[in-house]
Image: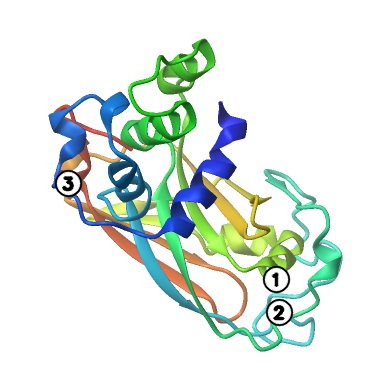
């Protein structure tokens, strides 16, 4: 089922957001969600927010500290995975702005939307789908979906990206990223997955959490999520 996530996200993101009744995820079973409701969950919901980003060059001569040499930061690849095939993307020539989606990809309502998109409306859920819905994950996983193909260059600076990535909380230390993974989606866009350990759990008392990362010298992504809106079945769903 996880192998289907890439195609599902691309399909619904390309279709664009749609207006539907609020909180449908609390009002009916996910198997009966309409296509518009699935799209809303994955693109414009308490767990999914659109963000406009500004891009610049990713060249080795930049003075920002992000360099393209082999393992320039000395991380030795620990905790990160590179994306093969990035050599065809040499620079961000002519690309300056884009819109991406920041998505809490492991939240149960998001998983439900993925399963519903794969199997269809009111269809029986296969065993792998049921396993996907209940499997435990030791990480909060935030995905940035829809990055333009040249962002494949980030596979050579994942250590630096990880150092710039965190979940900021009120009156508590931020949760820093443990892993950064790049994947190429079906439409050749790049999806970045940021995994944060759940050992210092995020709670409703913190009111909101802000995802922060920096993808190269100039591309910063900051998005705040209101935790009370991210409850599902009266529990915080992250």
Pointer 2 with pointer 1, Cβ within 8 A: yes
Q: Quadrant of the C terminus?
A: top left
Name the residue located 23 percent from the left edge and 39 percent from the top edge. 203
Q: Quadrant of the N terminus?
A: top right
Q: Which numbered disc, 2 or 1, marks the residue closer to the eye?
A: 1
Where residue 198 sits in the image (x, y, percent)? 41, 34
Disc 2 marks which residue? 58
Q: Which residue is outermost to the top?
A: 127
- Place residue 109 in its image quadrant: top left
Nearest to the observer: residue 172 or residue 31 = 31
Nearest to the observer: residue 190 or residue 197 = 190
The type of colouring in the image is rainbow
Nearest to the observer: residue 135 or residue 20 = 20
Q: Tag 3's secondary structure? A: helix
Residue 35: tell me if it is visible.
Answer: yes
Where residue 126 sits in the image (x, y, percent)? 49, 13
Name the residue located 58 percent from the left edge and 54 percent from the top edge. 192
Name the residue located 16 percent from the left edge and 50 percent from the top edge. 207
In the image, residue 148 sits, relative to residue 204, either above or below, namely below
Name the residue located 41 percent from the left edge and 50 percent from the top edge. 103
Disc 1 marks which residue? 150
């Amino acid at each position: 089922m996880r192998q289907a996530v890439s195609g599902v996200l691309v399909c619904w993101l390309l279709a664009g957001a749609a207006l539907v009744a609020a909180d449908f995820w609390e009002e009916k079973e996910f198997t009966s969600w309409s296509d518009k409701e699935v799209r809303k969950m994955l693109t414009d919901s308490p767990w999914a927010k659109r963000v406009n980003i500004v891009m610049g060059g990713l060249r080795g001569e930049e003075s920002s500290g992000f360099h393209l040499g082999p393992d320039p930061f000395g991380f030795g690849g620990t905790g990160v995975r590179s994306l093969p095939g990035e050599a065809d993307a040499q620079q961000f020539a002519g690309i300056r702005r884009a819109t991406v989606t920041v998505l809490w990809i492991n939240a149960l309502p998001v998983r439900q939307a993925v399963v519903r998109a794969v199997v269809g409306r009111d269809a029986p859920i296969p065993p792998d789908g049921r396993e996907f819905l209940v499997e435990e994950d030791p990480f909060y996983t935030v995905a940035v979906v829809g990055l333009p193909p040249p962002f494949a260059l980030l596979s050579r600076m994942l250590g630096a990206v990880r150092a710039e990535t965190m979940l900021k909380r009120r009156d508590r230390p931020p949760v820093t990223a443990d892993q950064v993974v790049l994947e190429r989606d079906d439409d050749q866009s790049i999806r970045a997955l940021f995994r944060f350990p759940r050992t210092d759990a995020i709670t409703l008392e913190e009111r909101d959490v802000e995802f922060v990362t920096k993808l190269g010298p100039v591309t910063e992504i900051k998005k705040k999520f209101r935790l009370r809106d991210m409850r599902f079945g009266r529990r915080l769903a992250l």
